[in-house]
Image (spheres, rainbow, N blue to C red):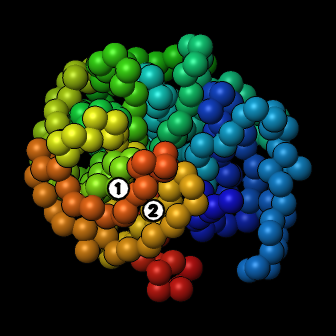
Amino acid sequence: NEIAHCFTCNDHDTILMTTQGGIAYGLRAYQVPEGGRTAKGAPIPSVLPLRADDIITSVLPVSQFSKDEFIVLATEFGWIKKTPLAAFEKLTSRGLIIASLVDGDRLNWCEKCTDADDILVGSTRGQATRFAASSMRPTARTSRGVKSMTLKKGDTIADMNILSGDKDQCLLVVTTEGYGKRIRTDEFRTTARGGSGVIAIKFKAGRVNDRVSTIRVVNEEDEVLLITSQGVIVRQKVKDISCQGRSATGVLVQKVDVKSGDSISTVSIVPKEAVDGSA
């Protein structure tokens, strides 16, 4: 078992949770059972009517339901939608459908944004596209949305990020076979939504089964936990991973026993506050 989400909030904040099946739940922070630092915590089904076959993929603390903010939802098959944050103000623990999904698709990403932000979506085959959040019109809570990018056969979405106006932001790209690099976000110019994107990483020669595991916005002070499907965990500083161009293949960030079927399954960002022990 591993930590998937870590954040700070106030007692009266709303904790917005979304599942792979397209259901959203809302809880007040004070409704979450309090525990000590070493406590295991309560099972989520004890506070939410979660189906046994559904998995929570995102957790967002919301202090205010601003009219200028939106929720951006993205699925594995490349569908994306933008819904006003205010539409979730009366969300309760009973849950509501927030996205209509085609068979086999999964709702994997949920982020807050404003019309001043950009959205960057990356695929498992190493492509990425960046477009303005304002280019998407707000849609109803139950709509399927629109195409974020055109995917080739067998390709799926690997990650979604909200980019602010900070030109010094970097993206961390890590592949399933353990290669990774940082890329400056200004290497991805803003284009129209729905295109095929540009190269975000090239795969090493001969690594025909390698795929992108993560494309995530990071700060130089962050640390990352790289976790394989067989339970091997490596922690390292982001600044120790070299910054390269889009067409570079990256460097080996974790040795992975590919022959035994192992691969990078999860990359978790450890914020500077948690590294310093102040959060």
Instruction: Residue 29 in the image: state x and y as whole percent.
Output: 74, 59
Quadrant of res 38: bottom right
- In percent of the image, x 55 and y 22: which residue is there? 105
For marks 2 and 1, give the one nearer the viewer: 1
**Front-lying residue, 199 or 13:** 199
Q: Residue furthest front?
A: 259
The amino acid marked with disc number 2 is Leu
**Front-lying residue, 180 or 209:** 209
Residue neighbourhood size for the residue with mark 1, other residues' Cα within 10 Å, grouped as few (<14), some (14–19), many (≥20): many
Task: Report the number of numbered marks.
Answer: 2
Marks 2/1 in contact by CB < 8 Å: the verdict is yes
Q: Please indicate, yes or no, whether residue 111 appears anywhere in the rendered image.
A: yes
**Residue of label 2:** 226
The amino acid marked with disc number 1 is Gly
- In percent of the image, x 25 and y 68: which residue is there? 241
- In percent of the image, x 41 and y 49: which residue is there? 258
Label disc, if present, on residue 178 of the rendered structure: 1
Above or below, 101 relative to 230:
above
- In percent of the image, x 17 and y 50: which residue is there? 249
The reply, left or right, for residue 136 in relation to residue 29 is left
